[in-house]
Image (cartoon, helix red, strand yellow):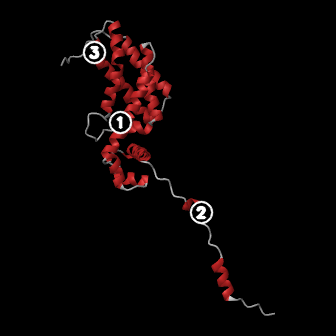
Amino acid sequence: MDPVPTDDRTNATSKKDKPPTSAPSGSRRARRRMTGKERREQLLDIGRTLFAERGFEATSVEEIAAKAGVSKPVVYEHFGGKEGLYAVVVDREMRQLLDMVTGALTGGHPRELLEQAAFALLDYIEQYTDGFRILVRDSPVAQSTGTFASLISDIATQVEDILGREFKNRGFDPKLSPLYAQALVGMVALTGQWWLNARKPKKAEVAAHLVNLAWHGLDGLEQKPRLIGHRRL
C-alpha cells in the first residue's frame, strides 16, 4: 500500500499557527537596579576582598569594576578612584577594631583588662581576617591615618589612662604610661599578626601567654630601671 502523500501546505500552516515557545519568566523580568547606597556597599565589599588578597598595588580599578559588573566610571563616581575606595575600607576596619577594643575594656582589675584587650584583638583577627590583613600592610594613601602604626597608637591611647591610674597607685611616674601603653599594645598586635597565619595555639591560650608576659613583667616593674650593660646613650 502506497503511503498517503503529505500536503506541504498543511504542514506549513500548522508550523505557522503553532504558538512560539514561551521564554523563561526570569529573562522577561527586568533585574532590579541597585540603589546608589547598595552599589557603594557592593564596591566596598569587593575592594576589601581584593585588597586583602593582593594588596593595594596589585588591585586595579578595572578588576573591581569587572567583579561588580559595572564600568570603571562608576567606581570613580563613588570613590574618586582606587585610593578613595581603599581609604574608606581602611577607615571602616580601624573603627571596627577600635570599637571592639574599647567595648571590651569593662573589667575592674588591671590584669583582667589586659586579658580583655588581648581577646578583643584576637577576636577581630578571627572574625575580620580580611580587614586585619589590610591593616597590617603599609598604607599607600598619603594621610596621617590608615597605617598599622597609627592603629597601634590609637588603641594604645585607649589604655593610657588605665595604666596611668595603676602607675600612680604603685608610686610610678604616670607620665610614662603612654610609653608602656605603646609597648603593651604593640606586643599584642605583633603577636596577633603572627597568629593570623599560624592559628596555633588556640586563641585563649595565646591570650593567656600574652597576659602572663605582660602582667608578670609589670608586677616586677622597677620604679627606676637601670641598664646593666656598658652603653648609656
CA–CA distance between discs 2 and 1? 44 Å
Q: Position of residue 116 (x, y in %)?
A: 45, 21
Q: In which quarter of the image is the N terminus?
A: bottom right
What residue type is disc 3 on?
Leu
Which residue is more in the foreground, 24 or 81? 24
Q: Where is residue 55 in the image (x, y as percent from the top left)?
A: 35, 44
- Secondary structure category for the residue under label 1: helix
Q: Position of residue 21 (x, y in %)?
A: 62, 70
Name the residue located 40 percent from the left edge and 30 percent from the top edge.
97
* Residue 102 sits above or below residue 228 on the image: below
Residue 134 visible at all: yes
Residue 58 visible at all: no
Q: Quadrant of residue 186?
A: top left
- Secondary structure category for the residue under label 3: helix
Per the rendering, the mark at residue 24 is: 2
What residue type is disc 1 on?
Asp
Check disc 3 and report the residue beneath it. 176
User: Alpha-carbon neighbours of circle 3 within 10 Å: few (<14), some, or many (≥20)?
Assistant: few
Q: Which of marks 3 and 1 is in front?
A: 1
Which residue is more in the foreground, 225 or 172? 172
Q: Earlier in the sequence, mark 3 or mark 1?
A: 1
- Secondary structure category for the residue under label 2: loop
CA–CA distance between discs 3 and 2? 72 Å
Q: In which quarter of the image is residue 41?
A: top left
Q: Earlier in the sequence, mark 2 or mark 1?
A: 2
Name the residue located 38 percent from the left edge and 36 percent from the top edge.
92
